[in-house]
């Protein structure tokens, strides 16, 4: 018995020595790990947006690190400088438990060794005081993280419920949870999130404005490819959303989903994006369901990467400044930047990018209208040539098809009649038929479309400098003249 007790005591003492040594080792590595993580985060944030002077809109820094044997306390500063806004600084405090066996994990029987476990909180500061006030003075944001010895990490952020009532403005937020898992050097990541509800009411100049959203879920996962872009799948779902503005019927959407996929195929970038709405209602009148599907491929990787960097660093800041000033964009690039832009564009076009709107549809109770578009781009040889000739060479192929369902047009016209207060069923049906027939007749008279059964169709094909429009072949100049003549007639009628 005494021998067994002695062995047990020896094991406990040995475990204590190992844990102490591990904690000391973790403490010595901690600052380097944190600085590397912040550097990676700053690199990612710099790619997401810059100001006109080239400075990043978001950046983070390690303010201090108080290191002890079994734990440490880190203070961070998140700097935010958005265009035409005062700089904001948010302070975070991070309570870090050293591995290999942090106490908080032992208490929950999670016994796998880790480098560190931490709890992060937003501190009350001048720039975050309003956020705290919206949560009755309580902590509005908390985070929990685990860093493994291989430097992979698991982090969860909880944005706690908020409620704000100000003169002419009310906000209610149920809270949001985000979980991010990543490998060392952020080579792989996975993000999930969910929110129950968000509601905003504002007293506008013309009357009250209301907007709300419910049932938000987010998923994103990817692996950094040779291009430097993350390759993988992203999905966003929203159970419902409502918008009510003055002097306009309320718009309600249910079952919204958006998904995207980025890939590298044979050394080039390819992407897909799908957006769907299960139900659209306007003023309590059901409209229908909508869908949009995009596909892109054959995008040169080095050129895409360079163009994106140029856009973030030089073009986007000018766009933001012009939008804030309410003036058209007058892009100004240095000679070197313009040369880089031209070089990248030619490299991009040499890969023959393919852009496809595979489907754009609206489906009502009795019909569905659709449109699709395919564009294949080509290398014009040089960008220094007249715009008319350049356009012919850049567009290698263009194919567009539009199908308008006459029953769908009648459904939309019926909904419009009900919104205008009409209740007589026969009158509503007659008005709907007249609208559908009128649109069909105008399409035929203007030669923009043909009636095929219950559909009005329009088809455009361009290749090798020739246009085929609804079966008629013509040159680009003849087609431009046809469209110009049609627009002139419409302008004269007004």
Image (cartoon, rainbow, N blue to C red):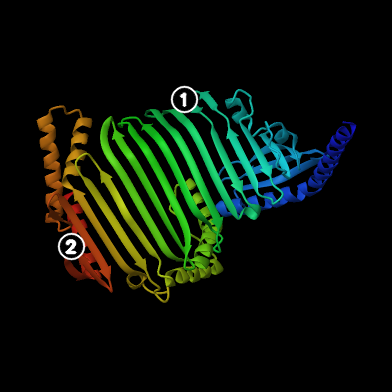
The one nearer the camera, 206 or 412, is: 412
Name which of mark 2 and mark 1 comes first in the sequence: 1
Q: Quadrant of residue 119?
A: top right
The one nearer the camera, 482 or 27, is: 27
Q: Is residue 345 left or right of residue 119?
A: left
Q: Which residue is at 45% across, 43% downward? A: 236
Q: Which mark is residue 168?
A: 1
Q: Is residue 288 left or right of residue 37?
A: left
Q: Is residue 382 left or right of residue 117?
A: left
Q: Which mark is residue 252?
A: none
Report helix, strand or loop for mark 1. Answer: loop
Q: Which residue is at 49% across, 42% downward? A: 218
Where is 350 relative to 114, above or below? Answer: below
Q: Which residue is at 35% across, 73% downward? A: 393
Residue extending farthest bottom: 381
Categorize mark 2 by other alpha carbons within 10 Å: few (<14), some (14-19), many (20+). some
The one nearer the camera, 438 or 146, is: 146
Q: Is residue 83 visible?
A: no
Report helix, strand or loop for mark 2. Answer: loop
Query: Distance between the Cα atoms at labels 2 and 1?
Result: 54 Å
- Where residue 203 appears, as percent x and y from the top left, is 43, 27
Q: Is residue 467 visible?
A: yes
- Where residue 94 appears, as percent x and y from the top left, is 71, 38
**Residue bearing mark 2:** 470
Q: Mark 2, mark 1: which one is toward the viewer?
A: 2
Quarter placement of the N terminus: top right
- Where residue 128 appears, as percent x and y from the top left, is 63, 33
- Where residue 168 appears, as percent x and y from the top left, is 46, 25
């Amino acid at each position: 018995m005494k021998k067994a007790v002695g062995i047990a005591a020896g094991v406990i003492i040995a475990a204590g020595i190992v844990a102490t040594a591990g904690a000391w080792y973790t403490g010595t590595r901690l600052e380097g790990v944190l600085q590397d993580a912040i550097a990676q985060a700053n690199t990612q944030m710099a790619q997401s947006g810059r100001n006109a002077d080239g400075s990043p809109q978001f950046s983070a820094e390690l303010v201090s690190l108080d290191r002890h044997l079994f734990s440490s306390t880190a203070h961070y500063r998140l700097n935010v400088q958005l265009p035409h806004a005062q700089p904001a600084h948010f302070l975070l405090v991070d309570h870090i438990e050293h591995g290999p066996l942090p106490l908080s994990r032992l208490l929950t029987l999670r016994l796998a060794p880790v480098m560190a476990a931490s709890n992060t909180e937003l501190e009350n500061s001048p720039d975050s005081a309003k956020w705290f006030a919206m949560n009755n003075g309580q902590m509005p944001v908390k985070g929990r993280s685990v860093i493994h010895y291989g430097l992979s990490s698991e982090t969860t952020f909880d944005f706690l419920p908020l409620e704000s009532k100000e003169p002419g403005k009310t906000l209610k937020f149920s809270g949001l949870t985000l979980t991010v898992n990543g490998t060392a050097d952020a080579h792989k990541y996975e993000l999930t999130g969910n929110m129950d509800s968000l509601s905003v009411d504002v007293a506008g100049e013309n009357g009250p404005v209301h907007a709300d959203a419910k049932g938000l879920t987010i998923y994103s996962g990817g692996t950094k490819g040779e291009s430097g872009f993350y390759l993988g799948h992203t999905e966003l779902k929203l159970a419902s959303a409502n918008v009510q503005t003055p002097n306009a019927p309320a718009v309600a959407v249910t079952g919204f989903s958006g998904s995207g996929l980025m890939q590298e195929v044979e050394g080039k970038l390819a992407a897909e994006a799908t957006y769907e709405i299960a139900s659209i209602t306007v003023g309590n009148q059901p409209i229908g369901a909508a869908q949009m599907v995009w596909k892109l491929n054959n995008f040169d990787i080095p050129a895409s990467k360079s163009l994106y960097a140029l856009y973030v660093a030089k073009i986007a800041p000018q766009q933001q400044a012009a939008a804030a000033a309410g003036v058209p964009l007058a892009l100004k690039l240095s000679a070197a930047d313009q040369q880089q832009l031209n070089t990248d564009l030619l490299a991009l076009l040499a890969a023959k990018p393919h852009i496809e709107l595979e489907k754009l549809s609206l489906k009502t109770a009795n019909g569905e209208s659709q449109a699709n578009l395919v564009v294949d781009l080509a290398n014009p040889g040089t960008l220094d040539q007249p715009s008319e000739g350049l356009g012919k060479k850049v567009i290698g192929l263009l194919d567009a098809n539009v199908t308008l369902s006459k029953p769908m047009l009648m459904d939309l016209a019926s909904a419009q009649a009900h919104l205008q207060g009409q209740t007589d069923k026969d009158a509503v049906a007659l008005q709907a038929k007249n609208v559908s027939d009128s649109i069909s007749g105008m399409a035929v008279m203007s030669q923009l479309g043909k009636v095929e059964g219950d559909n009005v169709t329009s088809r455009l094909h361009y290749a090798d400098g020739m246009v085929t429009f609804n079966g008629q072949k013509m040159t680009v100049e003849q087609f431009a003249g046809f469209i110009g003549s049609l627009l002139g007639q419409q302008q004269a009628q007004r």
